Amino acid sequence: MVKRAVPILLLTIAGVVPLWRFEAEPETVAAAEAPAATEAPGTSEAPATSQAPGATEAPAAAVKTVTGSLVRTSYGDVQVQLTFEGDVITKVTMVKQPNSAPTKKAVPVLVQETLDAQSADVDTVSGATTTSGAYVQSLQAAIDAKGD
């Protein structure tokens, strides 16, 4: 009986160890496709909303949407899209992000910090350090792509 137990135990361990070490390919969530750009790739521009009747004519700020570069991480792809009204960042959209709990918690924090700072000078979110770094990279690329 002992002669059979030792090989069975060793084979069981040999079969379970690879399962412990297995890492599945990270899943990346992609947002809905953005509208096709009319200018350079990664940018689009539209006129601002119209004024109320009788209002004095003031220069209207153009609405411009730019997409940052795709940043690949070990957890999945990260890509940011910004909407500007003039020089003000009014909307931040995650085009792609890893489908993980830390990322889902970090994204709202990163977006709010971006809207508050109006730049890529945002803090890393604890627990989502890699995603935060990739977010800042894509965010800075989107800001650079805006130009002006």
Image (cartoon, grey):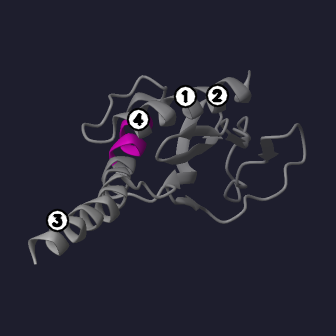
Q: Secondary structure at mark 4?
A: helix
Image coordinates of residue 7 in percent, x first then y, are 24, 66
Q: Earlier in the sequence, mark 3 or mark 1?
A: 3
Determine which residue is flagged by label 1.
137
Residue 132 placement, left or right of 105: right
Image coordinates of residue 3 in percent, x first then y, are 15, 70
Determine which residue is flagged by label 4.
130
Of labels 3 and 2, the one closer to you: 3
Q: Earlier in the sequence, mark 1 or mark 4?
A: 4
Q: Earlier in the sequence, mark 3 or mark 2?
A: 3
Q: Which secondary structure class fits the magenta region best?
A: helix
Q: Disc 3 versus disc 1: distance between alpha carbons?
A: 53 Å
Residue 38 in the image: above or below residue 4: above
Amino acid type, mark 1: Gln
The stretch in magenta equals 109-115
Q: Secondary structure at mark 2?
A: helix
Amino acid type, mark 2: Ala
Q: Disc 1 versus disc 2: distance between alpha carbons?
A: 6 Å
- Dot 1: few (<14), some (14–19), or many (≥20) neighbours within 10 Å? some
Residue 132 placement, left or right of 31: left
Determine which residue is flagged by label 3.
6
Q: Secondary structure at mark 1?
A: helix
Residue 141: assigned label: 2
Amino acid type, mark 4: Thr
Residue beneath the point at 67% across and 35% down? 69
Q: Earlier in the sequence, mark 4 or mark 3?
A: 3
Q: Quadrant of the C terminus?
A: top right
Which residue is at the front of the view, 49 or 40? 40
Q: Disc 4 versus disc 3: distance between alpha carbons?
A: 44 Å
Of labels 4 and 3, the one closer to you: 3
Amino acid type, mark 3: Val
